[in-house]
Image (cartoon, rainbow, N blue to C red):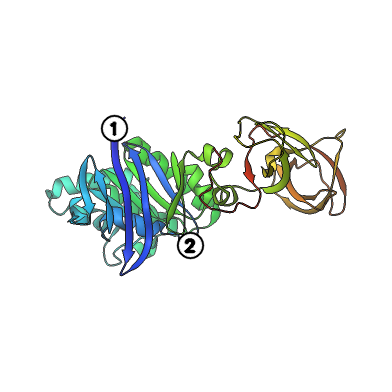
Amino acid sequence: MSTLLQVEGIECRYDQLVITQDISFSLNQGDICCLLGPSGCGKTTLLRTIAGFDPVYAGNIKLNGDVISAPNTQVQPEERRIGMVFQDYALFPHLTIGENIAFGLRKLAKRVQQERVMEMLDLVSMRELVDRYPHELSGGQQQRVALARALAPRPQMILLDEPFSNLDFELRKHLGLEVRRILKSLDISGVLVTHDQTEAFAMADYVGVLNQGHLQQWDTPYNLYHEPRNRFVANFVGQGYFIPGTLSGHDSVNTEIGTISGNRAYPWDDGTKVDVLLRPDDIVECSNGTIRAIVEQSTFAGSSILYRLRLPSGQIVESLFNSHAEYRVGDEVKIQVKADHLILFKQHDQDIAESIV
């Protein structure tokens, strides 16, 4: 599989304000990645820099091995063969859907334009709406048109800037999967910007977690959840609570709910004080368990219920129970730990760059 996009040590600034620093990652042809992080972390600036709207202060960006952005090089956006889907769709209100999609095809013959427009409308299942205007469409339909317009010139890559943020939850989830299917069917790479980790995990092959302008981890969704590189990633991705423990061997730790062993060894000495990350799926209901906890809060989620539990020490953990097992606030439940992935950090070390490997 060939490398399509290479981002190498780039720094982005607005005037003298540093927005992103020393960002590096690569993306293969046909892969979809997501830039994930809280507001103000630099993800949209990074996307705009890849698109060519903003310059780089240091480092470079390569597309198919050619430098398209560097301190002394700036290939114009329209020459990069990169499509862009904006948060607000940016459709032309005075043009029909067909005319919107054809807007970037003006250099082609009319017949070719018409064929391409219908091809794109078929791709997004909207052929019958070719003569409608944007204001006559729903938000989801407008988003499909924006995608079709971006795909019509047959770009090498598509950039999507929080494209589903204006839609309701169910439509957002459905469209995210639909966009992934379309991009995969065309073997087109995509870079998505979002602050919604559910969206990122559903769409992306790789996710880059950003915070304060730094790339914290570039990895698969599975590894981000089960093998977070530092505390920020551990806290930002997924749910869970830290409980204190003491290392007893390189791959086990003693805690108030017993000794927890996992899938990885840590280089620290026995007796090292650590914090153990426990996800809701690490704590399970057990009728004959020896660990007792009090229900503090419950959130019904259909097939399961997320319980917030207080241990005897006052420490909080969360657990997903089958929804048939219904408990009320104040009830006592018996639980046990089933943690296959051991995620530890030294206590009192809050450095966002702290590695756990």
| Number of numbered callouts drawn | 2
The picture quadrant where one finds residue 88 is bottom left
The picture quadrant where one finds residue 56 is bottom left
Element at label 1:
loop
Mark 1 or mark 2: whose residue is earlier in sequence? 1
Which residue shows up at 73% across the image and 40% down it? Answer: 246
Between 28 and 145, the residue placed more toward the observer is 28
Q: Which mark is residue 251?
A: none
Looking at the rendered structure, the kind of residue marked 1 is: Ser
Question: Where in the figure is residue 189, as x and y percent of width and height?
Answer: 33, 41
Question: Where in the figure is residue 138, as x and y percent of width and height?
Answer: 43, 59
Q: Is residue 142 in view from this perspective?
A: no
Question: Where in the figure is residue 203, as x and y percent of width and height?
Answer: 46, 43
Between 229 and 306, the residue placed more toward the observer is 229
* Residue position for label 1: 2
Q: Are marks 1 and 2 in contact (CB under 8 Å)?
A: no
Between 262 and 90, the residue placed more toward the observer is 262
Question: Where in the figure is residue 72, as x and y percent of width and height?
Answer: 18, 56
How much space separates mark 1 and mark 2, taking CA atoms?
Answer: 32 Å
Which residue shows up at 34% across the image and 55% down it? Answer: 47
Element at label 2:
loop
Placement of the C terminus among the 4 image quadrants: top right
The picture quadrant where one finds residue 342 is top right
* Residue position for label 2: 39
Which residue shows up at 26% across the image and 58% down it? Answer: 100
Looking at the rendered structure, the kind of residue marked 2 is: Ser
Label 2: few (<14), some or many (≥20) within 10 Å? few
Label 1: few (<14), some or many (≥20) within 10 Å? few
